Amino acid sequence: MRADLFSFVRNPTNVPFVIGRLTGILSDEDDGSLLVDVNGVGYEVVAPLGTRGRAKVDAQGRATLLVHTHVREDVLQLFGFATDADRFAFRTLIAVSSVGPKTAVGILSALPAHDLARAISRRELSTLTSVSGVGKKTAERLLLELKDKLPLSPGTEAGQGSDLSRERGPTHVSAASQASGDLLAGALVKMGYKQVEADRAVALLGARVAEAELPTLLREALALLAK
């Protein structure tokens, strides 16, 4: 059976199936990957940081991941993403010379699809080289080869201010509101979201941060981040 599987892997055109989506209960593995329990069958999935927190979850607590099935030589590996945009960005990245799946996941861990598209559109070399494992030559290649290939989210066109800066509104906030916002952002980060995502949720909630209890704010923040 194992030899048959590897014979399929060595010749990708003979692979009998490709997994494109998984819905199940997520849990973290020791190596940083995710385990998706689908009706008792566990699928090990490599995913960018923050994927678990951003994935859509149904009433039964099952999360849905969009999957890329990667087949090469004697390796069959699953990569999972919270959104179609992240999966598309991953597939676009691994099509670039010298950018493998591991590097692509690292890039998307630091820069989700919309942030990556904005960095490419604005030719922000320093943003790309700030990602662990991405040197200047690789960053320059990304700027060259990904130009016009990654769609920008509404409101993130080159030259515009960041979404976060526009959403924050007035810069003056009360001490109580600031404290509540810090607590909420900290809780979201512990749940797997990136700091920029946590800050964005706090900004979107606006005055609610000073008015509602933390459990309520968490539910509302998760609903906003899932959109």
Image (cartoon, helix red, strand yellow):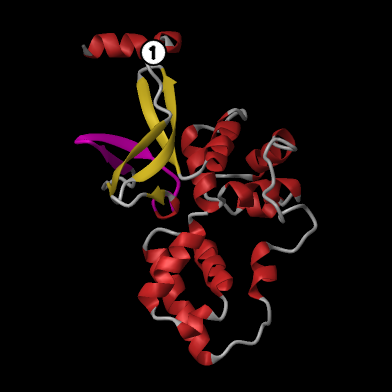
What's the residue at 71%, 41% (across, down)? 143
Quarter of the image with the N terminus is top left
Question: Residue 197 appears at what percent x and percent y?
Answer: 52, 62
Q: Which residues are magenta?
A: 34-52
Asked if the stretch drawn in magenta spans residue 44, the answer is: yes
Number of numbered tags placed on the structure image: 1
Q: Residue at x 64, y 74 (%)?
A: 168
Q: Quadrant of residue 148?
A: top right
Tag 1 residue:
15
The answer to whether residue 119 is left or right of residue 109 is right
The residue at 40%/8% (across/down) is: 14
Mark 1 residue type: Val
Instruction: Give left or right: position of 33 versus 176.
Output: left
| Image position of 185 with respect to 159: above or below | below
Q: Is residue 22 above or below residue 71?
A: below
Q: Residues within 10 Å of mark 1 (few under 14, many from 20)?
A: some
Residue 6 in picture, x, y percent from top left: 31, 13
